[in-house]
């Protein structure tokens, strides 16, 4: 993959070790441009608010948590995570567009 890369893990992830995975990505991609690797505090594997939805699988959720997820909608996720992701995409898109339109010397 040659495009920008955003790799996110929830710190409260019950499926994978976020610290190990993030460090592995950092080691493998140390010299790669347009890469951001981040562990999101208080987030689950799916970047949901761990205080409310810290289960390994959605199938583990009690029925009332399913209702709460539907009721809260976007607020089910860690505060600010969607703004962070959308801002990263905007920045990465601007950077990629500038690089792809830059004159090349031959």
Image (cartoon, rainbow, N blue to C red):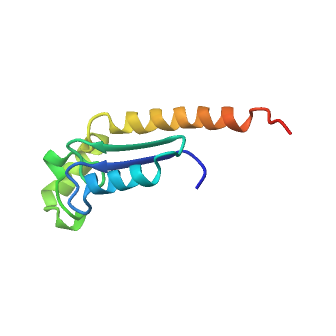
Question: In the rendered view of the protein, which quadrant contains the N terminus?
Answer: bottom right
Front residue of 29/37: it is 29
Question: In the rendered view of the protein, which quadrant contains the C terminus?
Answer: top right
Rendering coords of residue 85 (x, y %): 42, 39
Rendering coords of residue 55 (x, y %): 17, 59
Residue 60's quadrant in the figure?
A: bottom left
Front residue of 86/96: it is 96
Locate residue 73 relative to residue 61 in the image: left or right: right
Residue at 47% across, 50% down: 29
Residue 66's quadrant in the figure?
A: bottom left
Front residue of 87/34: it is 34
Locate residue 32 relative to residue 79 in the image: left or right: right
Rendering coords of residue 72 (x, y %): 24, 43
Residue at 18% across, 52% down: 53
Residue at 83% across, 35% down: 105
Q: Is residue 34 above or below residue 12?
A: above
Locate residue 18 relative to residue 103 in the image: left or right: left
């Amino acid at each position: 993959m040659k495009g920008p890369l955003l790799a996110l893990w929830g710190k409260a992830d019950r499926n994978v070790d976020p610290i190990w995975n993030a460090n592995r990505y950092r080691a493998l991609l140390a010299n790669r441009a347009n890469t951001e690797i981040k562990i999101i505090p208080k987030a689950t594997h799916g970047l949901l608010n761990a205080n409310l939805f810290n289960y390994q699988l959605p199938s583990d959720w009690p029925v009332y948590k399913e209702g709460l997820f539907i009721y809260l909608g976007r607020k089910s996720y860690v505060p600010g995570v969607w703004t962070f992701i959308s801002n990263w995409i905007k920045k990465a898109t601007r950077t990629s567009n500038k690089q792809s339109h830059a004159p090349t010397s031959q």
